[in-house]
Image (cartoon, rainbow, N blue to C red):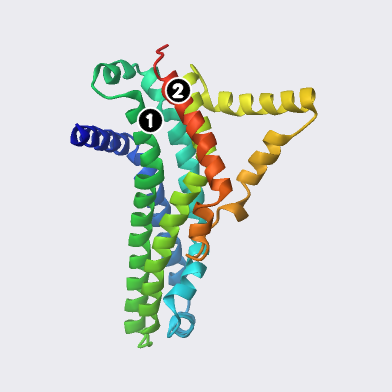
Amino acid sequence: MYNIQVTRFLALVEKECLENRHLMIGAPAILALVFFVFNFLVASQLEPSQIVMALEFLNRWFGGQSPVETAPIITLLAFPFVITFFFCSVIYLLNSLYQDRRDMSILFWQSMPVSNLLTVLSKIFTVMVVSPAFLVACMSVLYLSLIISLTFLGMRYDVEVAGLGYLLAATGIHLVILYLFVATTVLWLLPLVGWLLLFSAFARKAPMLWAIGVYFAIGFLESFVFGSQFLSNWAQTRFDPDNFIIVEFIGLSDRLLSYNMLIGIVVGTLLISGAVYMRRFVD
């Protein structure tokens, strides 16, 4: 029975990846391509002396440096990809359950031996585990292409590029940190994940407007009735980058085992339970 459930769950995850490949793979791949082309165009405009100077600088900067110490610097350069990932994730979560009801494919899935809980969990697993893996894969190809290009330039201009080996090692560590950062951030923002899934399962039209409108309505009622701003203050704290940005391994376990993380998981679980319950109803 357990193996059957796992097989069904993996089939649901595969379905999510195939149906949303333009968000999970296409968006980071296009961004990586744009980034590579931009660097190529910039390099093509440089004089040979400037290229040699840049290669020598990289060789001195990374040569002999600990990859663990230099990896956080590379991680800071990945934020355009991270922002793209979270933007695409919001779109995915808002449409994941809403789309099934809009095209009435929910009737097909409800006729199958697949529970609503398993369906919703597959979407959370996709955005927390699988989608970050696609992001890291696209960035791995980008970084490898850039390092190979730099190596060929070094050979062409007879510049020592031994330091690029340290850069490659630092890049590998950076990608591990990036994956952990994205996955743990999704876990930290689980209340947001649950909130978006709830309105994706509930709203008949415009789930984003419902999600935003209800949030502000609750905040207004709290302020008007109780004279407090607990909801807005808690949300502001939840979205404070200092609370979830990770650029190194230090402190990762403390953050994962903190009370704030636990509270967020509890709130997110309640909202996700609401999304599972609302999925029982068909428009």
Q: Quadrant of residue 176?
A: bottom left
Q: Amino acid at mark 2?
A: Ala
Q: Could you give the CA–CA distance between mark 1 and mark 2, rounded to whole angstroms?
A: 10 Å
Which residue extends farthest top? 283
Provide the residue designation for mark 1: 120
Which secondary structure, mark 1?
Answer: helix
Q: Is residue 145 left or right of residue 8?
A: right
Circle 2 is placed at which residue position?
201
| Of residues 129 and 207, the one drawn nearer to the viewer in this rendering | 129
Q: Kindly tell me whether residue 74 is visible in this rendering.
A: yes
- The picture quadrant where one finds residue 224 is top right
Give the residue at x 32% y 83%.
155
Which of the two discs, 1 and 2, labels the residue nearer the N terminus? Answer: 1
Amino acid bearing label 1: Val
- Residue 140 is situated, as x and y percent measured from the top left of the image, at 35, 61
Taking 179 as reference, is 230 above or below it? Answer: above
Residue 57: mark in rendering: none
Label 2 element class: helix
Q: Is residue 34 above or below residue 143?
A: above
Q: Nearer the viewer, mark 1 or mark 2?
A: 1
Image quarter in which the N terminus is found: top left
Q: Position of residue 239 (x, y in %)?
A: 61, 45
Return the residue nearer the eye: 41 or 233. 233
How many numbered tags mark residues here? 2
Position in image of residue 173 (x %, y %): 40, 67
Against 113, is 244 above or below?
below
